[in-house]
Amino acid sequence: MTSVEGHRRPPTAQQFVLEELRRAITTGRLRPGDPIRQEALAEEFDVSRVPLREALKTLEGEGLVTYKAHRGYCVQRLSLDDLREVYLIRELLEAEAVRRAVEHLTDAGLESAERAQAEVERAAAAGDVLEMAEANRRFHMTIFEWSELPRLVRLIRTLWDSTDAYRSLYYAEEPNRQRVIEEHRATLDLLRRRDAEAVVAVLAGHRAHAVTAIEARLSPGTTD
Amino acid sequence: MTSVEGHRRPPTAQQFVLEELRRAITTGRLRPGDPIRQEALAEEFDVSRVPLREALKTLEGEGLVTYKAHRGYCVQRLSLDDLREVYLIRELLEAEAVRRAVEHLTDAGLESAERAQAEVERAAAAGDVLEMAEANRRFHMTIFEWSELPRLVRLIRTLWDSTDAYRSLYYAEEPNRQRVIEEHRATLDLLRRRDAEAVVAVLAGHRAHAVTAIEARLSPGTTD
DNA sequence: TCCCTGTATTTTGGATCCAATATTGATTAT
DNA sequence: ATAATCAATATTGGATCCAAAATACAGGGA
């Protein structure tokens, strides 16, 4: 009965390459605008070009890379405008997800969210930033899934994926991590009271802060 | 001999297969829930499995098919619940797109929308349902693109793709086609007055009607 | 009979090879 | 010297072949 999701090892080369590509883009090793040389990358990951190309097709669907026939793939430029746009879309979708989620909220659901939050705090205490980011994601997705709108959740998940690069920037700073934990606690509290609009407001506040923080990190000249 | 338009290139096998797969799914030849046998399909389309698999990855990203490692692809079930969910998401996204679009509305933009509408009416007069559906799509996308939010437009486009099957059901009936034309005229009128909220209301009304009409066609117990 | 198990078959995942296209660089004519 | 043209190269698109995994099936045991 153990949920077998916790694997570190991706079962197929395709998924492995997908992870690695995301990481490479996220960490900036593959820089926006750069063309993607399939042969070189395939050799680096020690796979053939076939799974690499399938992974790239997935990333194309998520908007992380662009594709032109016979000219291959390029890492998508994620400008600040793009970031703002993604966060705007998330605003629209996540607000609805939360409203629906509260309608279907159960005690068991609340408990699973509390467990996710415990994992977030444990990772934060251990200083494991990567694990904290993942747990944070699980926390939010758990809530969104109560909406019982699987396609909506899928879209939101994809949007999160597409801004992984920036999220890691945000999580790199300790005050931001602390802020996330407090926001989660407030969220849980408001969920217990079934106050959907207040949760929506907290999430909106979080996104606004995240965008501001990331903008500040990316354009160092304009800090107040 | 360099033409101003992009030179028309023979489509790649991958793009060809993508189109064919979409058609096969929307026309019901590949029925929801059916597993996709790659070898058989590849032979039918007279291509190898490689471009087929890449096309399937694209469709997976669009939510038209599902995928499990080592178990292959399945045509996604598009239940009425799914349809309602897609239309709900469209509601959220298209409303924002229209609001932003009106902010950037120009006379040149209006003219291009009017041209698109002319094509819709021409196709309707000619009784070309398929062309009318495509022109209708161009009409709406033209408007959405004024929003200058390319990712938002991309998402909306994908959502439209995922319900092609049902849309053709809607367009099959003459009264519905007539209704679409009138809605377009009203939309153009409201756009000239920069009345975003009224346009949003028209679109919402259209979607509600479409869902109702499709539900009626699919649950034969309530009709003649 | 039912269930478990081991094997055969089917189906997908991945690697290599070849073809088609784009890009680069050299060459020639103006 | 510059621009156009054509050959050489690099890169992607696609086909075939092989490996790995899942499914189906047969046989044996309780």
Image (cartoon, coloured by chain):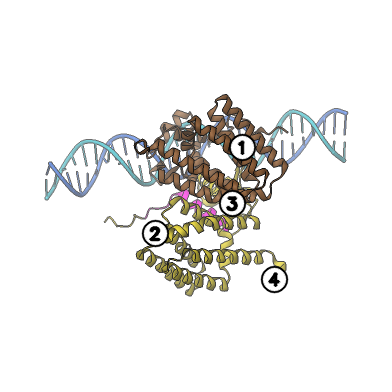
Chain colours: A brown, B yellow, C cyan, D blue
Question: At label 1, which amino acid type do we have?
Answer: Arg
> Which residue is the site of mark 1?
A185
Q: Which residues are magenta?
A: B8-26
> Which residue is the site of mark 4?
B223
User: Looking at the picture, do discs 1 and 2 lie on one chain?
Assistant: no
> Which residue is the site of mark 2?
B104
Whether residue B4 is situated above or below residue A199 in the rendered picture: below
Question: At label 4, which amino acid type do we have?
Answer: Thr
Q: CA distance from mark 3 to mark 2?
A: 26 Å
Question: At label 2, which amino acid type do we have?
Answer: His
User: Looking at the picture, do discs 4 and 2 lie on one chain?
Assistant: yes
Would you say residue B187 is visible in this rendering?
yes
Q: CA distance from mark 3 to mark 4?
A: 33 Å
In the image, A202 versus B12, the foreground residue is A202
Tag nearer the camera, 4 or 2: 2
User: Looking at the picture, do discs 3 and 4 lie on one chain?
Assistant: no
